[in-house]
Image (cartoon, grey):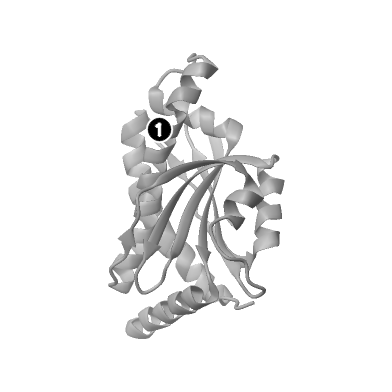
Amino acid sequence: MLVLTDFQQDVISELFNIGMGSAAASLSQMVGETVGLSVPSVEYIGHTMAVKRIQDIVGSQEVTGVKESFKGSFWGDALLIFPEDRSRELVRALLKDQDLPLETITEMEQEALTEVGNIILNACLGSLANVFQQNLIYGLPQYTQGDCEELLGANMEQQENDGLLLLHMDFILQETNINGYLTLLMNVDSVKALSDQIDLYLAELV
């Protein structure tokens, strides 16, 4: 499997961190309180290991998420994943009512999380596009729910040397700490294209 170097992964983490700052400001306005987003950790790992890593942290096979396709000089699907139970806590914060019944939250969960996903995914992908001076075309964000392995596996043809660019971050609200994962589902050719963009970016800084 093609592996990004540790330094390249650090560069991606820092670029995503820039995007997270913009996303945190937007989310803070939505929930009416400061939203902290931890510095994202990034690694490029195999599909099976990525599924296990998410399930171990999440503590469940069932997750909710928002998927958005992107294409340009590099391409793939961006998938923002939340533990199913914790995503409802985020919805409560968005709706500014901690006492909402579960039925009401469930009805509004899809719309609210899709909006959150749209903000975060576009901010992160946009930070890459801006730094690399590339245009990325985004698809419409789509709410998704189900088994973690199915959500990851359904978005790309699994090949022996394919992997996933897995980014882990924490959403820190006043009373809620929510784990989230941003996963870029990219085939080998796309990751190689991203690697080339990173090298060009670093060469220009020298």
Front-most of 181 and 110?
110
Residue 16 placement: quadrant: bottom left
Q: Position of residue 124 (x, y in %)?
A: 39, 56
Asked whether, in this view, residue 127 is left or right of residue 190, the answer is left
The answer, for residue 148, to whether it is visible in the render is yes
Q: Looking at the image, can residue 175 be seen?
A: no
The N terminus, quarter of image: bottom right
Q: Where in the figure is residue 117, as x and y percent of width and height?
A: 42, 44
Q: Residues within 10 Å of mark 1 (few under 14, many from 20)?
A: many
Figure check: 193 above or below 81: below
Horizontal placement of 26 versus 113: left or right? left
Residue under the point 61% across and 71% down: 162
Q: Is residue 95 above or below residue 197?
A: above
> Which residue type carries mark 1?
Ala
Please identify the quadrant where the C terminus is shown.
Answer: bottom left
Q: Could you say whether the residue bearing mark 1 is in a helix, strand or loop?
A: helix
- Rendering coords of residue 90 (x, y %): 48, 31
- Left/right placement of residue 49 relative to residue 13 reads right
Which residue is pictured at 47% across the width and 33% down the height? 173
Q: Is residue 164 above or below residue 97?
A: below
Q: State the residue at coordinates (42%, 77%).
A: 198
Disc 1 designates what residue? 112
